[in-house]
Amino acid sequence: MIQVKDLKKNFGGNQVLDGITTDICQGEVVAIIGPSGSGKSTFLRSLNLLEVPTGGQILFEGTDITDPKVDINRHRQKIGMVFQQFNLFPHKTVKENIMLAPVELKLMTKEEASKRADELLERVGLPDKADAYPDRLSGGQKQRIAIARALAMNPDVMLFDEPTSALDPEMVGEVLELMKELAQSGMTMAVVTHEMGFAREVATRVLFIDDGKIQEENTPEQFFANPKNPRLKEFLSKVL
Ligand code: ADP
Ligand code: MG
């Protein structure tokens, strides 16, 4: 679904991504871990061109989206993104937040989007919050709505950038549980996370990024039981 070839990104003289090559296949759940500042967010944001690569290629469903002639907005519609800080629109209700993109982009009528929003509110367990404003929700509820909003576009892949890092500890579980259900439904996912339990239990593959490179990638079993890279060993000794 996504092929990343020798992806590079620098901010001024700061080489943040230094040649990343990996594929994300349909149905995979790829957990991305690594120290703060190692380029995880930059990598994830590059996958839908929120960051414009300075080198290499990204093929999404076979199309090179780094080609300036490509209409990136058409491809972005197929790539859902969930951020640490939820980014809900504060002056719109929960349901309006979920309906907004499909209606604005004329992919659905208001009626269709409304029906889809109701389904999604049911799916994320918050049907009674349809008419609430985001500031009435807990952090965990906000993130579940942000996930519903991303799903409203019927994406082919979902990207998560530390979706539970801004949450109080008691709310982490409900968001991880929803993500696990999504994974089990067959959604293709790339998840930057510090939740090693999630990486171990739900991911099909784990990547360790450090110094702008993939230092190690493996099945969760091998990755955690038998890490090879010394930096990964050190990292795991701190976080496990
Ligand atoms: P991580 O998500 O692994 O913590 P990031 O991808 O956010 O790391 O950042 C990697 C490096 O890139 C950091 O040194 C950060 O300061 C730098 N960086 C990220 N975004 C920008 C930007 N928009 N402008 C300049 N530097 C940036
Ligand atoms: Mg980050």
Image: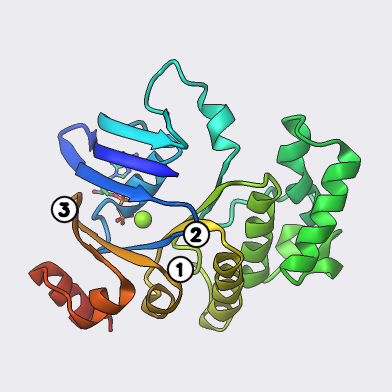
Quadrant of image for the N terminus: top left
Residue shown at 51% from the left, 81% from the top: 169
**Cβ of disc 2 within 8 Å of ligand 2?**
yes
Q: Residue 112, located in which quarter of the rendered image?
A: top right
Residue behind mark 1: 165
Residue shown at 58% from the left, 78% from the top: 171
Residue 211: mark: 3
Q: Quadrant of ligand 2?
A: bottom left
Q: Residues within 10 Å of mark 2 (few under 14, many from 20)?
A: some
Q: Earlier in the sequence, mark 2 or mark 3?
A: 2
Q: Secondary structure at mark 3?
A: loop
Residue shown at 19% from the left, 73% from the top: 235
In the rendered structure, are the residues bearing label 2 and label 3 in contact, judged by CB atoms less than 8 Å apart? no
Toward the right, the furthest residue is: 111
Q: Residues within 10 Å of mark 3 (few under 14, many from 20)?
A: some
Question: Quick check: 30 above or below 81?
Answer: below
In the rendered structure, are the residues bearing label 1 and label 3 in contact, judged by CB atoms less than 8 Å apart? no
- Whole-angstrom CA distance, mark 1 to mark 2, is 6 Å
Residue behind mark 2: 84
Q: Mark 2, mark 3: which one is toward the viewer?
A: 3
| Horizontal and vertical percent position of residue 165 | 45, 68
Q: Earlier in the sequence, mark 1 or mark 3?
A: 1
The coloring applied to the image is rainbow
Question: Quick check: 84 above or below 164?
Answer: above
Label 2 amino acid? Gln
In the rendered structure, are the residues bearing label 1 and label 2 in contact, judged by CB atoms less than 8 Å apart? yes
- Whole-angstrom CA distance, mark 2 to mark 3, is 22 Å
